[in-house]
Image (tube, coloured by chain):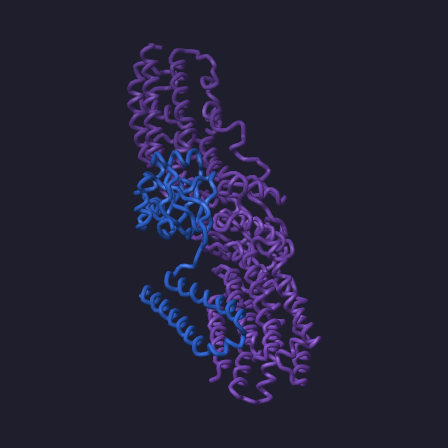
Chain colours: A blue, B purple
Amino acid sequence: MDRAYVKLMRWGLMFGLSVLLVAGFYFHAEFYALGLYPLLVIGGFVTLLVVLSFRIVMTGEIPRGRPSGNLVFPLGAGNAVANGGVEMAIVPQRDEAPTVGRVVRAMYPTGAEFGRLLVLDATRKFLDDITDEDARMAGYNSAQVLLSDSEMRLRLDVDTFGTLVRFRFLGKKT
Amino acid sequence: MTAHGGLLTLFIGADVSILVFVLLRVRQTWNKTLFVAMAMSFVVYGAAIAGEAEGVDNPLVAAIALWAFVLAHPLIAIAALAAFHGEDLPRRRPAILLLLLPVPVVASFAVAEDMTTGQAYTDPALSSFFAVCFAVGLAEALYVRMSSPVLASEATWIGVGIVLLILAGPLMTVELDALGLPSAGSLILGTPPALAAFALAFARTDPFAVTDGVKRGEAWSEPSIVERGVAFVFDEARPKNLMITARREADRGRPVLILRRKGRYSDPGDGRTCLSEIRPSAHAAAMALATVRGFLSRSPGGLLALPDLAGIATLCGWPKTLDLVRQIVRISRRTDTTLLISTSLLQEDERRGLNGLRLAWWILPDPAVEVDVMLRTAFGAAGSSIFDGFLKANALTRGSFNAHHVLALTTHLGTAMDAFASFGAELHVADGLRQLVAEASEALQEYSRRSALDLSQADWPSRDPESADEAMLVTAMDHWRGKEPEPAVRGDRATDPGHSLYKRTLAIFVRELGPTGEGLLRFELRRLGRGDSELRPSDLKRLADRVDVALETMVEIVDVPEARRRLQEKLGAIRRQMGLIEEEGV
């Protein structure tokens, strides 16, 4: 039902934009009174807005600019991150975690980037308070397995807390 | 329909859509009212001009258009300030409402002179009034943009909205007049994006939902546990003392607001406590600020608790969070409110930043640590096991244990010790144990009653130099009523071999089990029919077997794997040491 509603909204907005374009064609004779150069500037600007609006409506994503920050995942976790199997990363205490709304790079420890992520939520927790649900979102079976993982232990070292960053995969690097 | 009329209708439709969005989305009453008034003035103005473009020639329509046109301008300025000050606006910037005073005069003058919109913008008196309205809104937006990281983004949007109105209003009107094109209603061309910018700013500064909302009341003026008008930083690993303090204030009837992430620190107790959930948003700091303003405007003199400052920092960054704290501190001083902030989960540089604000800083202990120390002081190593048993039985962890659980803990102590004592009919042991439990319970209850101010003096059980380790060997005897300290434990020489063996055995039991060990040893000796000086090396094996059984029973009471393992280790150590004594043939 939700997806049908979103689709309906999207089509409705595109129809509205199309009506706007047709209205512009209908009244285009009035625009000539502005003169060539003002018409080029103003008309070009308005057309650009319409094109950007179509793009936003069709993709459902507001352009978010360049990524700022990275989230590192174990080697081979790329597919799980892309498919939604992993939707949370744990950032060590001493590292700066990305804030909500930012786009970050999804990277392997080797430095290779495999995609872009949108940060949906970030919360700090003591490592003792990490639940099994948190661990499953991070791609582990349980909290105990997560904290016992050698790579995780290496990253968390002597930390007492970490930042749990929940994200959505936006796509491969563009 | 003419092109002009059609275009205006389209833009008015967009304005109405944005108006509906704000009506549905924005929670703050003051902001919503101002936005509606501003948007409606644009809509009415646009509708009147569209009507004129379609040939409606009625002086009333023209008058309505001019009145709406004039009213819209001071509302732009007031709405801009409302986006930054929210419900606090009438208190922070009441002078802004004076901009509404000239509206009847200006509008009447414009109607009397039968002015068009273009003429209104070029008339010296009217244009000055409009310029002041735009300038006030724009200046406030610029000031907030430069001085407040929390509201910088919203100030940018408001500034953009006002600039668009200036472009679409006076500038475009004059330009179109110069080109000989119809300029009436050109302001409306800029209203959809401008209203969208305002709506975005209002939505981003909307407060979080507050449960159990407190109705508007008089300022709280009763005596408080923590001083009013002061901001306190509770330096503790987890905000336990902060929540206890907030709870105690709420129980006294003081309005309390607790801002936290979902699922955390939600033990408000009774009283007038409001809970507000910090939602995951990049604008969490601005929304938190609006929430605080709304609460304090209704309940001045209340208490504001921020156990989850780290939660806000994680969502929108430390610079905004620090600015949020500064602004809340200013508001709390002005409204005589107490502010409690926790340093839990803050990173080192964030703690330094908070320290730089020079707020009252209290270093406080963890109740779980202090209770553990007190239990180990009373019962030796078994004290930690008992504590762990209580936590497990009540689905708690050391992280979630707080001072208000002490009552349940003392009940558990009594139950656990009754179970331990019940396997023997030796009343003397039971009496001694109950005395021990009573004293420990009294100490725990006394600790739980201590206020944060008292604890901030750093007089905690864990800082007592005479804590658990020494008590295991020396003060065990002191807990038994009517008992004199055994010379053996203090290292005095025995007078006969049996007594010497007893002293050595006692030392083993006390070293491994603390004060409980002595009681256990005496109890088992009675069952063997031996007095203190009658113990023989050949009795040691039977004694060890009986202790085996007793400790297994104790292990069943303490249902924690780690604690069981420790008890079993101690049992093994006791058997080994008693075996050595037997081999020596003392």
Q: Where is residue B244 in the image (x, y as percent from the top left)?
A: 51, 47
Residue B397, compared with residue B300, is above or below; it is above
Q: Which of A27 and B450 is in front in this view?
A: A27
Image position, residue B364 (x, y; %): 54, 40
Q: Residue B300, located in which quarter of the rendered image?
A: bottom right
Which residue is located at x 60 percent, y 50 percent? Answer: B326
The answer to whether residue B222 is above or below residue B349 is below
Q: Which of B538 and B113 is in front in this view?
A: B113
User: Residue drawn 31% across and 28% down?
Assistant: B550
> Residue B93 lies in what quarter of the image?
bottom right
Q: In this view, does A6 lie to the left or right of B170?
A: left
Q: Residue at x 40, y 31 (%)?
A: B382
Whether residue B254 is visible, yes or no, is no
The quarter of the image holding the C terminus of chain B is top left
Pick the front one: B383 or B185: B185
Q: In this view, does B235 lie to the left or right of B96?
A: left
In the depicted structure, whether residue B51 falls above or below residue A99: below
Residue B249 visible in the displayed image: yes
